[in-house]
Amino acid sequence: MAVLPILVAPHPVLKQKAKPVAAVDARVAKLMDDMVETMYAAKGIGLAAPQIGRSERVIVVDVHEKGETPNPIRLANPEIVWSSEEKGICEEGCLSVPEQYAEVTRPLSVRVRYLDEKNEPREIEADGMLATCLQHEIDHLNGVLFVDYLSLLKRNMILRKVQKQQKASA
Ligand SMILES: [Zn+2]
């Protein structure tokens, strides 16, 4: 497994619509493992392949609480097949928009169909933090960042701060 560098907004790959994988073979399974390791190293709860520069429909999430056993979920070609009418507001952040947070309104519960690391079709029904995280990561596969839900003013303010930080740490 390998820890990979994470792209920071605005990067063109983050705005692309990612391509589905044909099947979860050894190559995709390795990509999933590398993404899990990269997510843990960055202390994130989710990561999408475009964030490491791979425009493929692969995401990993793990919303376990501190002190609980890690519980990574690896998803290829994830698709939201149902979402609740009830919505909730959650404060979101993103490894590609470092140290910036904002409230985003999304459906409270979702059902997601995907291929697991063994290429088996699966469905997961999620609510709370996991539902938010899955929707956030699936957005990445469609070139959407959480800041895209904010007003233009707020979005530009956040992206400017990120650029400033990047320059300061370069
Ligand atoms: Zn993100």
Image (cartoon, rainbow, N blue to C red):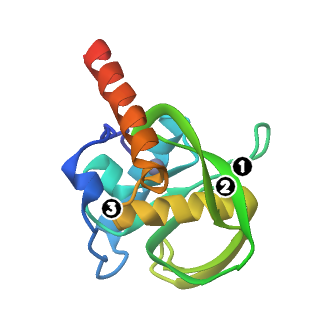
Task: Inspect the image, locate mark 1, and give the three-letter code of the amino acid beneath it.
Answer: His
Q: Secondary structure at mark 3?
A: loop
C-alpha separation, residue under disc 3 versus residue under disc 2: 26 Å
Task: Inspect the image, locate mark 3, and give the three-letter code of the amino acid beneath it.
Answer: Gly
Q: Which of these two is toward me, 34 or 48?
A: 48
C-alpha separation, residue under disc 3 versus residue under disc 1: 26 Å
Q: Which mark is residue 64?
A: 1
Q: Determine the residue located farthest toward the top in the rendered image.
A: 168
Q: Which residue is mark 2?
A: 71
State the residue at coordinates (49%, 69%). Answer: 75
Chain-order first, disc 1 or disc 2: 1
Q: Determine the residue located farthest toward the right in the rendered image.
A: 67
Q: Which of these two is toward me, 156 or 102?
A: 156
Compared with residue 69, is residue 127 higher up or lower down, i.e. above or below?
Answer: below
Q: Which residue is mark 3?
A: 143
State the residue at coordinates (39%, 47%). Answer: 152
Tell me where residue 107 sits by quadrant: bottom right
Q: Which mark is residue 165?
A: none
Q: Determine the residue located farthest toward the left in the rendered image.
A: 12
Q: Are dots 3 and 2 in contact, CB under 8 Å?
A: no
Task: Inspect the image, locate mark 2, and give the three-letter code of the amino acid beneath it.
Answer: Asn
Spot occupied by residue 37 in the image (x, y as percentages of width and height):
47, 43
Quarter of the picture holding the N terminus: top left
Q: Are dots 1 and 2 in contact, CB under 8 Å?
A: yes
Spot occupied by residue 132 in the image (x, y as percentages of width and height):
63, 60
Compared with residue 24, is residue 30 higher up or lower down, i.e. above or below?
Answer: above
Q: Is residue 31 left or right of residue 61?
A: left
